[in-house]
Amino acid sequence: MYKIKYITILFISLFSIKVSYAQFENLDIGARSTAMSGAFTSLANNSNAIFYNPGGMSQLKFREISVSYSPSPYGLSELSTSAISFAEPTNYGVFGLAFKNYGYELYREINAIVNYSNNYENKIFYGANLNFYHLSIKNYNTANSIGIDVGVLAYITDFMRFGFMGKNLTGSTIGQSKEKISQVYKTGFSFQPQKDFNIMIEAEKDVRFPLSFRAGMEYNLMEYIDIRGGVGTEPSIYSGGIGINYDVLQLDYSIHNSVDLGLTHQVGVTVNFGGKKAREMAKDQLKNSFKK
């Protein structure tokens, strides 16, 4: 039974990342963005933007910290994923930090990120991540590597944004066998037909796999509640979730269904020190940037 369990874990680990042979796969982080099937590159307006679009971090006007946790993806605690992200706006741009942990005692990936982002006339937002990768496999040597991500987000009109991210542009590898770290490009548009409603349509290309598409929506149902949904291809996924906001605190929950693997869940807690003011500013930021 012990061997069967770990063979199953290995199979699901590989299959859930498209039967990949790379390390540090492009996993969706954050219950808010996961609820929209990862279609967050062209919105990227909280501290988890560090994982989706480094440039989007410079949209933040107040200090923010976010914690997310997926304890047992597809019922397996060995695939546990946790992350924390932090954004600090200053007069010289926004500085960000993040830490992601994936795996269990026999196999563990740790990714630490340092981010810097800034903007031009509050319409073009650009940034970069410096990644430190650490891989440990029990009874084998550990390995380290570094890599760079870049991202840009542009306000096209007073209701449309464009986003792009290049993940691991350096093509970094890890370990003596030079295992590839995933290299991914994401791009797309977000639309804001009204201040309480966002729609995202995006494409994602891992250099080793077919092009995939993501679409998501987020609607502020009432003052304290957001509802979200999303779909994706390659692999086929469906998702949904809810956010509850009160003053500086936001609680998020997402449910994610893979046609091949079944259901999984993620929870997140975000603290934005701007509170209600920050939330209202984020809703109006796109339109206000085009006002004379």
Image (cartoon, rainbow, N blue to C red):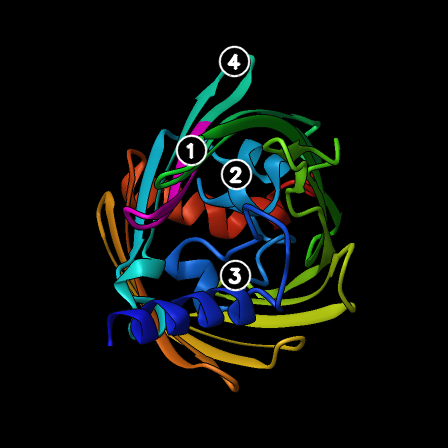
Whichever of callouts 2 and 4 sits on the residue coming sooner in the sequence is 2
Q: Residue 50, labelled with which disc?
A: 2
Does the rendering let one see residue 128?
Answer: no
Residues in magenta, as a range: 97-110
Q: Secondary structure at mark 1?
A: strand
Q: Residue 91, labelled with which disc?
A: 4
Whichever of callouts 2 and 3 sits on the residue coming sooner in the sequence is 2
Q: Secondary structure at mark 3?
A: loop
Residue placed under numbered mark 3 in the picture: 195
Is residue 98 rendered magenta in the image?
A: yes
Compared with 125, 44 (above or below) is below
Residue pictured at 54% horizontal, 79% vertical = 237
Identity, as a three-letter code, of the amino acid under mark 1: Ala
User: What's the CA distance linking mark 1 and mark 4?
Assistant: 21 Å
User: What's the CA distance linking mark 2 and mark 3?
Assistant: 23 Å
Residue placed under numbered mark 1 in the picture: 98
Is residue 57 rendered magenta in the image?
A: no
User: What's the CA distance linking mark 1 and mark 3?
Assistant: 29 Å
Residue pictured at 24% horizontal, 77% vertical = 1
State which quadrant residue 206 falls in. Answer: bottom right
The C terminus lies in quadrant: top right
Considering the whole magenta stretch, tell me its main secondary structure.
strand
Between label 1 and label 4, give the one nearer the viewer. 1
